[in-house]
Amino acid sequence: MKPYMVFSRCCGSREGACLVFAHNRQEACKVAWKECYWEITDEWIDVDVRLLKENTDWLFTLSDPAKVDTAHCISVPVSCQQCNKWGDPINHEGCCPDCWDYIQAQRKDNPI
């Protein structure tokens, strides 16, 4: 299984995307359309799929253990509380690495 980001080709991934675990791109597209198309788009030809290649080991912790060998969709993956993006690990404060670095820099510049 590989992790894929499925989103609207027209709107782009910033407007919303689903996490799909599938064997290939075609299967990811079919599963996303079947399980969570209303989150992405209302037209089949507008669905786009991107294989997530870097730093993806943590995404498998979001996968349903009962469906580990079956293609499935997570329509609302855990995301950063600051920027609402997912794809990077979320820390104990609920932030992605980029937002966490920014918060830390702000704290250094403006100590309480």
Image (cartoon, helix red, strand yellow):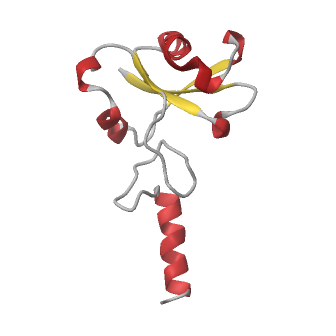
Q: Residue at x 61, y 35 (%)?
A: 16
Q: Does 99 appear above or below 106?
A: above
When asked about the image quadrant of residue 66, the answer is top left
Instruction: Give 66 or 9, whichever is nearer the viewer.
Output: 66
Instruction: Give 27 or 83, whichever is nearer the viewer.
Output: 83
When asked about the image quadrant of residue 20, the answer is top left
Q: Position of residue 99 (x, y in %)?
A: 52, 62
Residue located farthest toward the bottom when viewing the structure as drawn: 112
Q: Which residue is drawn at 65% across and 18% down?
A: 47
Question: Which part of the image, by quadrant, shows the N terminus?
Answer: top left
Q: Residue at x 47, y 65 (%)?
A: 100
Q: Position of residue 61 (x, y in %)?
A: 29, 37
| Count of numbered circles in the view | 0
Q: Where is residue 86 in the image (x, y as percent from the top left)?
A: 50, 43
Q: Where is residue 85 in the image (x, y as percent from the top left)?
A: 55, 46
Q: Does 80 appear above or below 19?
A: below
**From the viewer's perspective, is 21 left or right of 40?**
left
Residue located farthest toward the right when viewing the structure as drawn: 10
Residue located farthest toward the left when viewing the structure as drawn: 66
**From the viewer's perspective, is 7 left or right of 81?**
right
When asked about the image quadrant of residue 38, the answer is top right
Residue located farthest toward the front when viewing the structure as drawn: 38
